Amino acid sequence: MKLKKQIKRPLIFISLFILPCFSIFAQNNFVIDVKNVGAEIQPEMYGVFFEDINFGADGGLYAELIKNRSFEFEHPFLGWTPFGDVKVQQESPCFDKNPNYVRFNEKGLRTGTGLENKGFTGIGFHQYDEYLFSFYARSISNDENKFKVELLNAGNAAIGTSEILVQGNAWKKYTCTIKAKETEAKGKIRFILETAGTVDVDHISLFPKETWKGRKNGLRKDLAQALYDLHPGVLRFPGGCIVEGNTLKTRYQWKNSVGPAENRPLNINRWFYTFKYHFFPDYYQSYGLGFFEYFLLSEDIGAEPLPVLSCGLACQYESKECVAVDSLDSYIQDAVDLIEFANGKVSTKWGKVRAEMGHPEPFNLKMIAIGNEQWGDVYVERLEKFVKVIREKHPEIKIVGGSGPSSDGKQFEYLWPKMKELKVDLVDEHYYKNPEWFYKNAKRYDTYDRKGPKVFAGEYAAHDTDKANNLRAALAEAAFMTGLERNADVVHMATYAPLFAHVDAWQWRPDMIWFDNLTSVCTPNYYVQKMYAKNAGTNVLSIKSKDENITGQDSLYASAVLDHENSEIIVKVVNISSVNHEINIKLDGLKKSFEDKEVKITCLHSNNPDSQNTLAAPLAIVPGNYSISSEKNSFKLSVTGNAFYVCRLKIKQ
Ligand code: AHR
């Protein structure tokens, strides 16, 4: 009913949304060739890249609220404030791969004996939400020892409390639920032994009771929901540089990230010390969000999983450490075993591990990336070994190779032909560049070799002068992405990077989604990704102005696709200038006609390209929707300055 009214009075409705900022219109004509349906667009085309950077996993998406829950950081009390008699021990531990635990020894003195933990830059509590507190313990003296646990606000007042009895001298798990009486962004927990006695304690954990999809060891609801809403086709994980490590010892080893979360050995996070000006000595990887959880997340958000594994080279920016080419067996075996973990029958060694973790069905892994930002012959020689074995054992799995850390230059030029020789399926390209680069490179793939491996734009983001997540950067990405879409025969996947950042603990920006301990905000860059992913279509259509692709003429960029399944034509138009345009978009060769006259439009716009969304004003720039009416085989799109439009029209087929 409402919709019909909008169609009948398009101008009135549009005027509310756009006309106030219109003054002069430049005229343009675009023609879409509907007769010649072009290349297929891969369902994975627009995806996300997740790395534990900016406290994206521990302290972010992974819902655990306690930092250093197993006392395994290099300084075991980092993150904790011990008081009274609490000491770190290792003898007959609860978890062999995380051997540290703490011994509470309370003699009945006034100081009390206990621990406080402030989480990751404070613990966020939501009023009336319940929190699951748990720990492992054994009584060393007494049969029974009582603990009190308190949720505290920033003023040190208890806003939730509970008591737990520890019984017996064998390690056991204890759990209680605590409701928060107040909302607090910078809270903490206090855990006190209330009886005079000696008790060993390990793996002290606090989770919101409600995690995304109610999963145990789960994910923070708002952040996972934002990923789901994005509609991503692929999830690349777990990095990034953390795959490589600054040393081979600290590389990401997926086998350490599966099995019971309590017994996943801790690893340092290289983003702890990579940037001296953003130094975070408390940044470690608990692997609580590990490969099982990544596969599950991929499944839950409808994205194809794309794991990245070490190729036997530590980060080449930081180190020359590498595994000898003839000693790569265990690294290659890790790749083969990962395929078994994801896809193998439950009777296989790694398929069994997956099943025991709660997922007997295979995850249907289809591709794997070897190496992140590697370069030189050291990479090629090692990748070759992986390719040989994976092809032999798993010809069904696509292999993603890399083209180094730059979008061009010596290493890039060297690696691409090598990737063709190795016959990898996709080549990962990375570009963190200024908006001008993105405008210019909207044509980048028009001239790529159509016969070689496909392109995976695995990391990219427009870096404006202040590296802000502003509309200018988002529009530069949108403009560039018209080129990805037009060249979907060559470009098979693209993932913006990085994904998450904690406002109080980031190392790298811009990032797609920002958060604090309570809330999150989606950037204009997020909305661009979402508008593409939700309107990906199934096949490319040619859209031209004066017989040329629209790649910056009059500061306009455009692409068009057919959505075969829904019989719709989808047109994307980006205007990076402040000049308004009236564009006549004609559909050439339309066999029948439009199913109806409605053109549904989604528009992301602001008069000020510097504008951003913030936690305080998260909806400053969000896409708006409206409809206009089409004519017989065309429609007129009024395009305001600094805007990205997606237009959808239903056609008869
Ligand atoms: O996305 C941040 C970092 O940028 C990634 O870890 C790395 O691959 C690139 O250098």
Image (tube, rainbow, N blue to C red):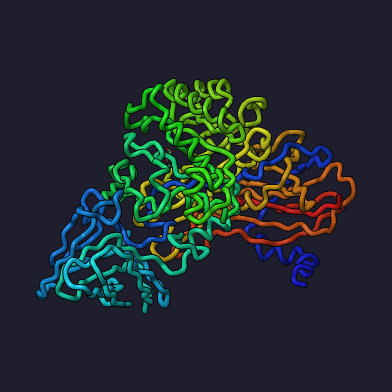
Identity of the residue drawn at 47% across and 29% down: 404
Whether 33 is drawn above or below 113: the answer is above
Residue 90 percent across, percent down from the top left: 20, 53
Judge by depth and name the residue closer to the eye, 35 or 210.
210
Identity of the residue drawn at 29% across and 50% down: 96
Q: Viewed as shown, does residue 112 lie left or right of 548?
A: left
Residue 560 percent across, percent down from the top left: 72, 44
Whether residue 215 appears in this view of the structure is yes
Residue 305 percent across, percent down from the top left: 55, 45
Q: Quadrant of the N terminus?
A: bottom right
Whether 357 is drawn above or below 116: the answer is above
Q: Ligand 1: give its quadrant.
A: top left
Task: Specify the farthest residue to the right.
Answer: 592
Whether 27 is drawn above or below 440: the answer is below
Identity of the residue drawn at 38% across and 61% down: 64
Judge by depth and name the residue closer to the eye, 568 or 49.
49
Residue 617 percent across, percent down from the top left: 47, 64
Q: What is the quadrant of residue 58 in the picture?
A: bottom left
Whether 650 is drawn above or below 485: the answer is below
Identity of the residue drawn at 25% across and 69% down: 168
Whether residue 461 appears in this view of the structure is no
Task: Specify the farthest residue to the front.
Answer: 347
How many numbered discs, if any? 0
Judge by depth and name the residue closer to the eye, 466 or 531.
531
Q: Viewed as shown, does residue 417 lie left or right of 274?
A: right
